[in-house]
Image (cartoon, rainbow, N blue to C red):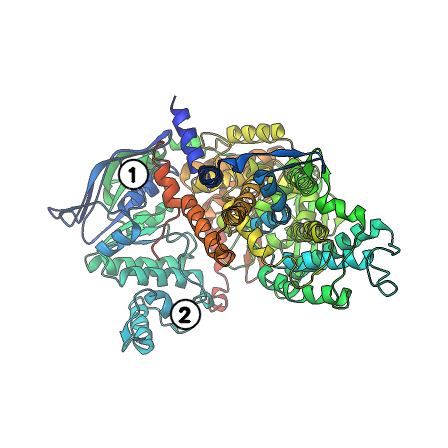
Amino acid sequence: MPDHSLLEMKGIEIEFPGVKALDKVDFSVNAGEIHALLGENGAGKSTLIKCLTGVHHMDAGTILFDGKEIRPTSPQEAFSMGISTVYQEINLCPNLTVAENIFVGRQPMKGGMINWKEINRRAKELMSRFHMDIDVTRPLNNYSTAIQQMVSIARAVDIDAKILILDEPTSSLDDNEVQLLFNVMRELKAEGMGIIFITHFLDQIFAVSDRMTILRNGTLVGTYNTTDITKLQLVTLMIGKDIDVIFNLKRAHVDPNAPEMLRTENLGTPGQIQNVNLSMKKGELLGFAGLLGSGRTETAELIFGAVPATEGTEDINGKRVSIKKPLDAIKAKLAFCPEDRKRDGIIGDLSIRENIALALQARRGFLHPISRQEQNELADKYIKLLSIATPDAEKKIGDLSGGNQQKVILARWMATQPDLLILDEPTRGIDVGAKAEIQRLMLEMCNDGVSVIFISSELEEIIRCSNRIIVMRDGKKVGEVKGEECTQQTLLSIIAEGEQEGASA
Amino acid sequence: MKKKSFNLSGVMQSKITWAVVAELLILLVCFIIRPDFFSIKYQPATGMLYGSLIDILNRSAEITIIAMGMTLVIALGGTDLSVGSLVALSGALALKFLRWDVLVYNTPGDYTVKPFILVILVPLAVCTLMGMFNGFMISRIGMQPIIATLILMVCGRGIAQIVTNGKQFTTLYSPFRVIGQGSLFFLPMPIIITAVVVIGVSLFVRKTAFGTMVESVGINPSASRLSGIDSKKIIMIVFALTAFLSAISGLITASRVMSNDSNNFGINFEMDAILAVVIGGTNMSGGKFSLAGTVIGSIIIRTIVTFVYYFGIVSEATMAFKALIIIVVIVLQSEPVRKKMSKFGKKKVTGGVQHA
């Protein structure tokens, strides 16, 4: 280990109204190191990073960067010192070209005019360094999330960054794309860059990081070499509880004589997805597995009417329904937690209380308001039931951590007392503890007679929870397995079958 | 114990607080220059109270009424530019029905009025339909509100001209005079109408879930739709309501002068209404709104104008003077200033910062 760290944060303390967000936390990064920063939601990872990038101002502690004490007061300042951040949500202009995005704000000039040739040439060069041979003159939104992520990393790296912070960069990438990102990370590491890697995917930490620092409730648990620690130890350290307690989940019991809850026949919309044929029992947990873009989300949206079906039939509890918009679905006792929590889930500036009451209120119509007292009762009930970490129900949902936001959205739907709950990637981007809690809730609801459709990219959790798993590829159902009989191997082989033809898409 | 300082900080951070402070400051200046500014006298001849403060409230009525609707429009993340034209249209329609006899009699006075109820209802109904047209263009066709309402802003005055054949009518019909010049409970009628509108809209918005839904759609339309909120209906109602309120405002305007003037009625009303909303603390990008703030905003605007008249500042300078004070108000309310002022409490952290 080199005798001096590239970055050293010592005794960092920060207090927000009512909570000590960080308490005497030490953190260091060496040059040429990938250092994972771990902890549950609300453990203080983001707060620590925001101290480093000047978003928050710490109450105590010092930051040494390259041997000198720094105290950035704004992200711009940190950025100009060589501390670059790539956020989880892609933070670029989708309608500008790739090259424009990389160089926006610092365009090379020639005689007072922007030198487009130079921009495009350098952008091309930069992207090919990341093994991405793409047309940099096309608008960014022509490309997949993965490529957009690469562009934002390229942008961050191009400015002589010494420290690169990657905040959940992999949460919307598939496996191949993750590998690509890892290669780039390793190359940057070899060039002597210090990389701070924040993620909830434990496998990825072991695959790519050199050291890891674990936070819990705003305090430092410790810093470990990746080779010295096992996954089990890691999880135990993160949540501070024995893992068995958390992972002791029992699959829901489905009565073989239970009535049919949902039946679709040839449901579809041309151009989106077609010929969806599903049948589900009351209290069943049906898992949807498959790669991103395999049609899992589209199927869910079709059932819920987020995208109205133009053909086929849908029956709920044996009754034919016509679902043209989400409100129809909600009236038919369906509920849908969408994949993109930020874009489609939370109403950021409204309180937790208002967010929880929203769907129930929408079903009643605005002329039949839920009284303030009822709203308070609902909010208190679900804050307690889902252990949402908040001082009170009036806090803005936008100020909560990802896992807690997800719980509020879940509460919004539980409040409508649905018969069928569709959860699209409910555990993405949230920590192990919250994940286990959401899984537990799902299973409890099944036991209470609610049917659940569970979409996830993580095979492990799909297998652990589902009664039945439907595997999708290219908008079609390609297999169906019983949960008990399923292994990761079986699922993988069904997903991968015919992968060659699907890979080009 | 900690809670108290936190609350104070919250109050100091509220935009409404600063709007009220600004209004009080302007009034204070008025008081220093002319101590009789606050005097209110009763005039037995008309049965009304008179005074600068009453005048401010009276004259702010048109903008306050429109701005109630505009607040909701802005909370949805839009703007409505057509309100001024609808004021003109409403006035034209009212006078058209008041002077149905214009072909027979040239001078107002001896005429046969159509049922008075039509004089009121037709402008309200037509303008509401116009507002639904706005709502339709926005929610169904998917036009941006500023563009969709620009159509009516431009052609609304034309329609008003067509209604009256390009003529300006005058009337002496006394029931119509009551709207803009009458009184109730010693107060000028426009103040009473404004109070009814403000209370009515506030109750509608806050006693039902309509307000929350407007905010929800304004903050995140996609999530609102998936939660079952019918945003098309919400948009439709908000634009129809705003147009309806513009029509009321138009009736008051016309009644004040007992005439119609398609070229000059409601000029710049859209700007004043938007300004009132913004001064009142509602963000132009949509979301949380405050009707009370808007009322204060509207009163501030009118106080400035009264101030200008009252102190004999040359009328050419009115606009510049108005702009000056508004800049001061907006700066007082701006994020950095409010933050500095709220240093009593613990510092607050900004979220969602990113390098651009």
Which amino acid type corresponds to the residue marked 1 in the rendered image?
Ile
> What residue did someone put label 1 on?
A214
Q: Residue at 34% across / 65% down in the picture?
A: A104
From this view, report whether residue B294 is shown above or below residue A60.
below
Q: The N terminus of chain B appears in which quarter of the rendering? A: top left
Residue A97 badge: 2
Q: Nearer the viewer, mark 1 or mark 2?
A: 2
Relative horizontal placement of residue A71, taking residue B191 as reference (left or right): left
Relative image position of residue B180 (x, y in whole percent): 71, 46
Relative horizontal placement of residue B278, taking residue B123 as reference (left or right): left
Residue A57 badge: none
Q: Is residue A312 visible?
A: no
Residue found farthest to the left: A3
SS class, disc 1: strand
Protein chain holding label 2: A
| Mark 2 surroundings: few (<14), some (14-19) or many (≥20) residues within 10 A | some
Residue found farthest to the top: B1
Badge 1 and badge 2 both on one subunit:
yes
SS class, disc 2: loop
B128 or A56: which is nearer to us?
A: B128
Which amino acid type corresponds to the residue marked 2 in the rendered image?
Thr
From this view, report whether residue A287 is shown above or below residue A474.
above
In terms of sequence position, does the residue under pointer 1 or pointer 2 come before the other? 2
